[in-house]
């Protein structure tokens, strides 16, 4: 039963996520809130694993989430469910390729979909930051507000950002460095 | 039958060499599918990519479905898609089963706490890279801000809009806004 719900949830994700792997994130957060199959911290870990292994990120995420929820069959079926809408939609579009490319409506829809898609990715980034850069529990307790920020993590973040933007280091290398920093400085 | 097996195996191989998802794949596909195998042309591949990027679903899978369909109809599309997914699914299953066994180790937890920081940066980077093409005028900036606020603060909103609904509404808003824009342009042109 769980597997069926898992497949439905991922098929829906595949149908509505526009703009690549990270566009699946808002749906994963929604799934996490509604079902508790995995936590917000799990999602951040899934992104890391997906970014450092081959294959489409969306598929990596669904395999990981499916496995966490329902073992090996869960991983395989969640990925196939995520991919199914892609295949069906493209098979239809391939028949009308010319019309699709020149359609005013299609162009208009993407005029709206593109900013919405990166807005949702940004919000997902904020969700990861809540786990990675700050200690949300401080807000509920009466601790000093400086404890709210995880300073070691923020410094690492700034350095990684510079390495990514200015030096254009490969994501896999950045992830390896961050993992090492996490172990050495006891994040 | 050989054709299908060929499609499956070619895509099986491609599944192992494509790091970083959709956009990073284009140069590899150009070399393997256009230059080496002549299954498609560079122009065609670019077309498939631009459509794959703006249709729902996994970009890489959208592109492989196009090529599989062209080579062998619906069975061809399925062979290409399944071939492409086999490797990544196996790799993640192996990693995931290791992780569940070692997740409680302090070393692994520290490593992932560090990695999450990196993930934040990678997401910011993806947003910056897509920004120029997506947020092009006042309307798209407004749409970005509304969708971002609705999503980021959904916890404290009195009502919750599911992401699927936001996607549909954004598509409709886009069609309406570009229709209004073309009408305005049309009027200005006729007044002149």
Image (cartoon, rainbow, N blue to C red):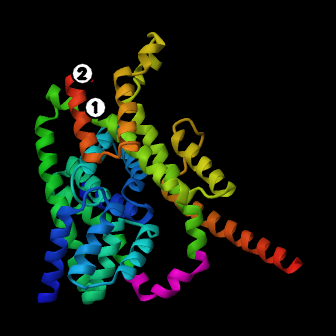
Q: Which residue is mark 2?
A: A185
Q: Which residue is mark 1?
A: B114
Q: Where B73 sits versus B34, above or below?
A: below
Tell me which corner region of the image, top left, top right, bottom left or bottom right, holds residue B6.
Answer: bottom left
Q: Is residue B114 visible?
A: yes
| x then y, percent, for residue B154 | 53, 41
Q: Where A5 sits versus A33, above or below?
A: below
| x then y, percent, for residue A184 | 20, 24
Q: Nearer the viewer, residue A37 or B105?
A: B105
**Disc 2 packing (10 Å; few <14; some 14–19; many ≥20):** few
Given the current orientation, which residue lies at the most extreme front position? A167
Q: Secondary structure at mark 1?
A: helix
| x then y, percent, for residue B70 | 30, 87
Range shown magenta: A91-105
Q: Is residue B78 visible?
A: no
Tell me which corner region of the image, top left, top right, bottom left or bottom right, holds residue B33.
Answer: bottom left
Q: On what subunit does the disc labeled 2 rest?
A: A
Q: Where's the C terminus of chain A, which quadrant? A: top left
Q: Nearer the viewer, residue B162 or B87?
A: B87
Q: Residue at x 22, y 75 (%)?
A: B32
């Amino acid at each position: 039963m769980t597997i069926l719900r898992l497949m439905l949830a991922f098929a829906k994700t595949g149908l509505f996520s526009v703009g690549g792997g990270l566009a699946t994130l808002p749906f994963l957060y929604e799934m996490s809130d509604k079902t508790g199959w995995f936590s917000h911290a799990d999602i951040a870990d899934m992104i890391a694993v997906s970014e450092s292994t081959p294959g489409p990120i969306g598929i990596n995420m669904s395999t990981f989430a499916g496995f966490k929820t329902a073992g090996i069959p869960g991983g395989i079926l969640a990925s196939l469910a995520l991919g199914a809408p892609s295949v069906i939609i493209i098979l239809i579009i391939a028949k009308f390729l010319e019309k699709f490319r020149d359609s005013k409506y299609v162009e208009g829809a993407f005029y709206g979909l593109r900013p919405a898609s990166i807005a949702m990715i940004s919000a997902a980034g904020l969700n990861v930051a809540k786990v990675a850069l700050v200690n949300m529990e401080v807000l509920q307790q009466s601790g000093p507000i400086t404890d709210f920020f995880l300073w070691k993590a923020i410094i690492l973040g700034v350095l990684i950002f510079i390495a990514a933007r200015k030096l254009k280091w490969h994501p896999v290398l950045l992830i390896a460095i961050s993992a090492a920093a996490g172990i050495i400085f006891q994040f | 039958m050989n054709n299908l097996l060929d499609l499956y195996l070619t895509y099986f191989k491609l599944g192992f060499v494509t790091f970083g998802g959709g956009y990073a794949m284009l140069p590899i596909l150009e070399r393997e599918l256009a230059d080496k195998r002549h299954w498609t042309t560079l122009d065609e591949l670019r077309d498939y990519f631009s459509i794959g990027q703006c249709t729902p679903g996994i970009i890489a899978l959208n592109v492989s479905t196009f090529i599989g369909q062209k080579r062998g109809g619906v069975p061809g599309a399925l062979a290409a898609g399944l071939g492409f997914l086999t490797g990544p699914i196996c790799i993640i299953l192996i990693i995931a089963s290791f992780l569940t066994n070692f997740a409680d180790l302090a070393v692994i937890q520290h490593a992932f706490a560090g990695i999450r920081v990196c993930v934040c940066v990678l997401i910011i980077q993806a947003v910056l890279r897509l920004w120029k093409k997506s947020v092009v005028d006042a309307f798209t900036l407004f749409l970005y801000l509304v969708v971002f606020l609705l999503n980021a603060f959904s916890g404290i909103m009195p009502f919750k809009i599911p992401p699927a609904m936001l996607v549909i509404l954004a598509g409709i808003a886009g069609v309406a806004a570009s229709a209004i824009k073309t009408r305005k342009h049309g009027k200005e042109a006729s007044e002149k």
